[in-house]
Amino acid sequence: MSVSSLLSIFPKPEDLLALTPEDLGGAIIEVAPSLAQRGMFNIDSLVSALYPITGASYPDSSRDAIVMAMAESLAWLSTQGLIVRDPQQPARWYRLTRRAVNLHNRADVEVFRKGRLLPYELVPALLAQKVVPLFRRGDFDVAVFQAFKEVEVAVRKTANAKNAGYPDSDIGVSLMRKAFHPENGPLTDTTVVVAEREALQQLLAGAIGHAKNPTSHRDIVIDAQEAARLILFASYLLGIVEQRA
């Protein structure tokens, strides 16, 4: 891209100012390599590309607002670990981080943003291996299905380790109701009151019925935020099953 690419992307200042810091951050990642000097860039180089001495330019009256918008986006990029201040420079010069070098355009940054909605440190190793890659690719409905399938498999395995003898045909809501039956379920906790045992049975059965069954029977539209919440819920349920082992 040329140095004037910011003007090509945002022909008018209101186009740029209408963006969130995250969206503008994607554009900065896209144009930064063409503006970099020895791999570095700063806010002045970004702003100057919008106010060239000759040719098309933003009106000077918009400069203060543009500078603030750029500063907000640079702050967001920094918190996401995509840019870092060059430690060898006294002034505020930035470099793309190792995490950012594979993000070449705004679409790449958008995928990165969606992936960050799921806090991976809260996801157990099993889901990190099988579910997180699906989420990162944007296959949100498949990721949710896989997460709750792992809950189902874990319930069956844990119950069978207690000699429940559940076959693979025991699935879904009926499996949860049997495994967590408040009176004789192999995974129920008899040290708590019956009402709490019933609540846990209903929680597991309802979760599978709500989150796994629809995705296994038909196409379901799930956005990144909803998928992240459901995967974290599945992570919580897996923790309960592990406690019953």
Image (tube, helix red, strand yellow):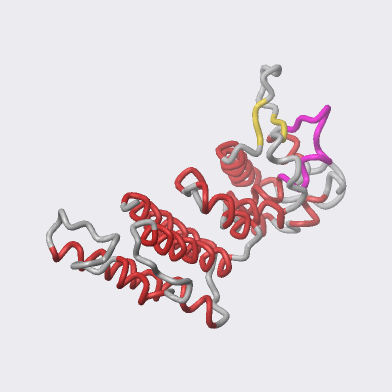
Residue 160 highlighted magenta (yes or no): no
Residue 39 on the magenta span: yes
Camera-side residue of 7 and 125: 125
Q: Is residue 163 left or right of residue 148?
A: left
In which image quadrant can residue 99 be found? top right
Nearest the eye: 109 or 232: 232
Count of numbered tags:
0
Q: Position of residue 39 (x, y in %)?
A: 80, 30
Left or right of 77: which side holds 180? left
**Residue 162: quadrant of the picture:** bottom left
**The residue stretch that appears in magenta:** 29-41
Q: Is residue 185 left or right of residue 156?
A: left
Position of residue 66 in the picture relative to residue 221 (left or right): right
From what the image shows, is residue 183 above or below residue 106?
A: below
Residue lying at 55% horizontally and 82% vertically, measured from the top left: 218
Q: At 65% from the left edge and 56% from the top edge, which residue is drawn?
A: 111
Which one is nearer the viewer's eye here, 216 or 40?
A: 216
Query: 127 or 154: nearer the eye?
Result: 154
Query: Could you say where residue 70 lies in the image, as x and y percent from the top left?
Result: 63, 43
Residue furthest out toward the bottom: 218
- Give me the residue at 73% from left, 57% from top: 10
For residue 55, above or below residue 93: below
Residue 96 percent across, percent down from the top left:
72, 35
Q: Residue at x 46, y 65 (%)?
A: 148
